[in-house]
Amino acid sequence: MKFKLIYPKWQKLKRQTEFHLPPHGPVVFAATLPDYVDVEFVDENLEPIDFDDPVDFVGISMMLTIQVKRGWEIADIYRKKGVKVMFGGISTMLHAEETKNHADSIFLGEPEGRMDGVFSDFKNNRLKKVYDYMDDRPPIEIVGTARRDILKRDLYNYKGVQMVDLVHASRGCRFHCYPCAVAYLGGREFRPRPIDKAIEEMESIDNNRLFIVDNSLAQDKQWEMDLFREMIPLKKKWCSHPIEDKPEVLDLAAQAGAWYVYQAVFDTSAYIRERIKRYHDYGIGVEGTILLGLDHHTEDYIMRLIDFLLEIELDMAEFTVLAPFPHTKAFDALKGQDRIFSYDWNDYSADKVIYYPKHMTPDRLQQLLDYAWDSFYRDESQELKMSKLFYRVIQKEMEDNTFRPRNRALSSSAFGKGV
């Protein structure tokens, strides 16, 4: 059976360097397919879709809200040709009701242990309109190594430099942050993979640099320390979302190859200042992610926040405005207050203001977003800061004899958004 798996294109942020990380969702999904399925992966961000190429079944994997309208367009083209289309992925779950109108089937939830049944239904012409496993998650122990062999590796480079590979060591998140949909998508129970399974997958990746894409590694201190301890012999260099900033955790993280963390900077407190300092004390870089436009943000607050970011010497910073994605606390609150003025999903890019802020006009918040980027990178450009962060990882690799000039990966200010 020929199955074409498509990752729809999406418009990059205007401040984002134009490069592409190998997407994680499709390769994880591909690992769950039955053996008789011949899968071809097309990342439309890097190559066009050949709609005339004969195919038995099409899957569309969507991660971002700004992919959904293009995903629907692709599905409509195939369905007019008589080809059945199934949707899956994060944004399918966030936009399920609308997506059903463009699909023969939608899959909601995690795919492990489910695809044999789905493809059996397809072969026997009894494909269901909806496969809903949102509240019936598979045992985390059966999550296997992702199918990175479906990727066209030569496409994932930037000026000849190979990008990082993405991997995950856990699912779910016990936190329930205001702008985040993870509690809806993956549940509020932290579900770590068995450490030996995660290590086995990391070891199998033919790339010395990784991005551990877990929502947060700082959810179970003992598990986190055990994971880092087992990662030390791999000599990989990696970045991730937050880790705990306790000395014993940071020491193990540094030994395990922590390159830098992607850390939310949500206020100007001594707590944040000390947290960034502790990362730096252990040789771990920090890229701050700064969300503007929350209800307590006045113009003066945002100005002071930007000054604070320069004081604490972040290695990089990424600025966005609040995007109230469906199934988040932010969406429920702002919709309930009739403050969202655009439901055009192409506007949900996190660099466009699509709601009425509490203390300023939408135009003023948009101006402050530009001001934040310009101010932070006024003395040193984004490219220069990136180069410094990248040079640091080369130094780490040369110290432990793992530097491979022909298999380099690029540090970026967009690891949390550029997939």
Image (cartoon, rainbow, N blue to C red):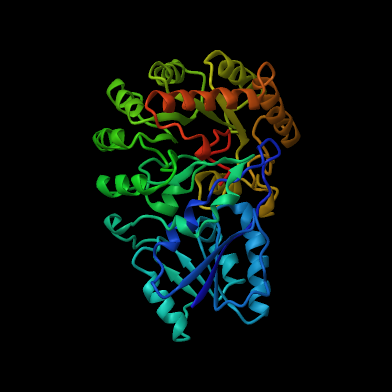
Q: Residue furthest top?
A: 311
Q: Is residue 190 visible?
A: no
Q: Is residue 224 left or right of residue 295?
A: left
x, y percent for residue 140: 30, 55
Q: Residue furthest bottom?
A: 124
x, y percent for residue 59: 54, 68
Question: Closest to the observer: 271 or 209?
Answer: 209
Determine the residue positioned at 64% across, 54% down: 46
Q: Is residue 411 left or right of residue 11?
A: left
Question: Closest to the observer: 23 or 214?
Answer: 23
Q: Quadrant of residue 91?
A: bottom right
Determine the residue positioned at 65% across, 44% down: 339
Q: Quadrant of residue 110?
A: bottom left
Q: Is residue 178 above or below residue 186?
A: above
x, y percent for residue 174: 35, 42
Question: Closest to the observer: 394 or 333?
Answer: 394
x, y percent for residue 233: 29, 35
Q: How many marks can you see?
A: 0
Q: Is residue 399 left or right of residue 82?
A: left
Q: Is residue 309 above or below residue 132?
A: above
Determine the residue positioned at 49% across, 44% down: 180
Question: Closest to the observer: 321 or 211?
Answer: 211
Q: Is residue 62 above or below residue 333?
A: below
Q: Is residue 76 visible?
A: yes
Determine the residue positioned at 61% across, 41% down: 160
Q: Is residue 281 above or below residue 341?
A: above
